[in-house]
Image (cartoon, grey):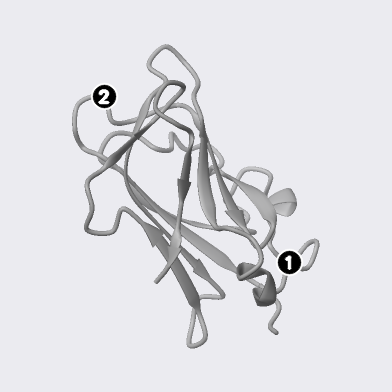
Amino acid sequence: MTAINAIDVRVATSSGAGGGTDGDVYIGVAGREFYIDRTGQDDFEQGSDVTYHLGDSSMTNASQNDPKVPALDTADLNRFPVYLRFEPLGTAPDWHLEGVRVTVNPGPNEVRFGALVGAPDLWLGQKTGKFCYLKKL
């Protein structure tokens, strides 16, 4: 098939009370898991809507979260689920996820996945679940 050279992950956090989190967020694509975090930023705050570019130098541990190393292939998008995983941290650990979209190889031949698109928001946490699986759009 085609090598995966880039992955964009758009994450929206609810603007409702207590929606933000200091927890850790991961995205699973093509059989590999990536840490979603921007260096020096307070991510996943109440009302935030941010697109993360995996492999971009502004990402925390950019070289370890680069979809080109080791090489991934779009054929694996049908072999493994695409998901978001949340690990709660801090004194208010729950997170109110409003929506998530993943775009593999953004551009004319992109492949998109999403969850909660036009659906109610989802609370993630220790007692509400930590995974949100995405469907192909």
Residue 84, compared with residue 44, is above or below; it is below
- Observer-nearest residue: 111 or 59? 111
Residue that lies at the very extreme toward the top in this rendered image: 91
Give me the residue at 44% from left, 63% from top: 135
Q: Is residue 97 left or right of residue 93?
A: left
Marks counted in the figure total 2
For residue 21, what is the image quadrant? top left
Q: Amino acid at mark 2?
A: Gly
Closer to the camera in the image, 29 or 44: 29
Query: Residue at coordinates 47% horizontally, 38% vertically from top-left?
Result: 41
- CB under 8 Å between callouts 2 and 1? no
> Among all residues in the image, which is located at the extreme front?
79
Residue located farthest toward the right when viewing the structure as drawn: 70
Q: Position of residue 3 (x, y in %)?
A: 71, 78
Q: Nearer the viewer, residue 41 or 66?
A: 66
Residue 56, how many percent across, how many down? 60, 59
Q: Indicate the position of residue 34 as horizontal and vertical percent values.
A: 63, 49
Vertical relation: 70 (above or below) 130: below
**Residue position marked by numbered label 2 in the rendering:** 18
Split into 4 quadrants, where in the image is the C terminus?
A: bottom left
Q: Please report whichever mark, 2 or 1, sits nearer to the chain's N-terminal start.
A: 2
Q: Relative to residue 51, is residue 120 drawn left or right?
A: left
Q: Which residue is mark 1?
A: 68
The quarter of the rendered structure image containing the N terminus is bottom right
Classed neighbour count for the residue bearing mark 2: other residues with Cα under 10 Å, few (<14), some (14–19), many (≥20): some
Mark 2 vs mark 1, CA separation in Å? 36 Å
Q: The residue tagged with tag 2: helix, strand or loop?
A: loop
Amino acid residing under circle 1: Lys
Q: Secondary structure at mark 1?
A: loop
Answer left or right for 98 relative to 65.
Answer: left
Residue at (52% x, 86% y) in the render: 109
Q: Residue 39, position in %: x, y?
A: 56, 41
